[in-house]
Image (tube, rainbow, N blue to C red):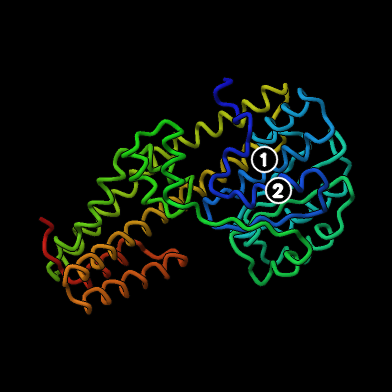
Amino acid sequence: MSELLPPSDPWDEVVGQPDAVAQLRAAAASPVHAYLIVGPEGSGKRAAARAFAGDLLATGLDAAGAERARRLAGAEAHPAMTVVEREGASIAKEQADEVVRQSSLAPPEGDLQVIVLVDFHLVGVAAPKLLKSIEEPPPTTVFVVLAEEITPELVTIASRCVQVDLASVPERLLAERLVLDGVAPDVAATAASGAGGSLSRARLLARDPEAAARRDAWYRAPERLDGSGAAAATVADELLGSIDGVLEPLEAQQSEEMARFLAGFEAASLEPRKGDLKRLEDRHKREQRRVRVDELRSGLATLVGRYRDQLAAGGSHEDFLSAADAVQELCDGLALNPNEGLQLRAVMVRLPPVGARH
């Protein structure tokens, strides 16, 4: 199973973030109590946290010990590395209590433990409970907090951390990284263009044989509209049905991640800790929901792009604005878990038809 183990240099997984990588690598030699890594989904926050934890836990070890520490941290399997993921819409108070308890304990191995808090922009009401532990942990504990943005609940905690900012990965770098991964250049370019700056999404699209056809279907959708409810319903239902196609490569990707996770423990002759497997399975379920919504948003963006192209070719400014407004209303409402079929049909009814491409 050696091919499933993390790369020898986990920093290779943090693409297009040279300043952040340099900052974290320098910090590992003399760490402070807490770091806050902020960036959009897919920018490499979690990969950076794994690499940083590996460097922290490798400090002071011989070459073999340092390699083991980095490899185990890369698989999130190091005994002195705890990764905390929310179990619901936000971090629960019970989880916060466990983080407080864990942070006060001696490291189970070595002189340092690293506690990684994922999705901390969703900390919610647990923030006050965690503040004291994050700002004044024992000298043997380092917190690495990951967030997509600094929400009002996170402001005070953020002020107690060293902040490291990540940005969306440029499309060119995404394509280059996919090619290094062995993806054909034309497939890499298509996947990168639809990834929205996310390496994880680019990798998913690169292994999805229907990605280009699905994008083209969204682009051509306005050609099939005639203002009738029947046409709108047919187009909307077909587009929504096609979105489920992205789940098959995602499930394959998640199976590989599970294998790497288990291989990390196996390589160290360890057993997964209590609840580790369930937390990974729960995260995979959340990823499936998020990827489906991301695919819908990507399709809607492609739809607006068609009207933008139409406008650039001399089309109606009013048609473009009408399409953009209708799509934006649906995008804004996705956070409320609407009936996607009904909402997309309503958008399609409002969209003005356009001429076919030649």
Kindly state the secondary structure of the residue where label 2 is placed: helix
N-terminal-most mark, 2 or 1:
2
Distance from Cα at disc 2 to Cα at disc 1: 9 Å
Residue drawn at x 67%, y 47% is: 22
Percent x, y for residue 282? 57, 45
Up the image or down, 147 lies above or below 201; here it is below
Residue drawn at x 81%, y 25% is: 62
Amino acid type, residue under disc 1 in the picture: Ala
Give the residue pinned by disc 1. 51
Percent x, y for residue 262? 62, 28
Percent x, y for residue 150? 64, 66
Residue drawn at x 41%, y 43% is: 175
Q: Residue furthest bottom?
A: 318
Is 6 positioned to the left or the right of 84 in the image? left
Give the residue pinned by disc 2. 24
Figure quadrant of the C terminus: bottom left
Q: Quadrant of residue 140?
A: top right
Between 71 and 100, the one lying in front of the other is: 71
Q: Which mark is residue 296?
A: none
Residue drawn at x 84%, y 62% is: 132
Kindly indicate whether the residue at mark 1 contacts the one at mark 2 (C-beta within 8 angstroms): yes
Kindly state the secondary structure of the residue where label 1 is placed: helix
Up the image or down, 341 lies above or below 210; here it is below
Q: Quadrant of residue 249?
A: top left
Between 268 and 167, the one lying in front of the other is: 167
Q: Residues within 10 Å of mark 2 (few under 14, many from 20)?
A: many
Between 31 and 324, the one lying in front of the other is: 31
Amino acid type, residue under disc 2 in the picture: Leu
Is 253 positioned to the left or the right of 115 in the image? left
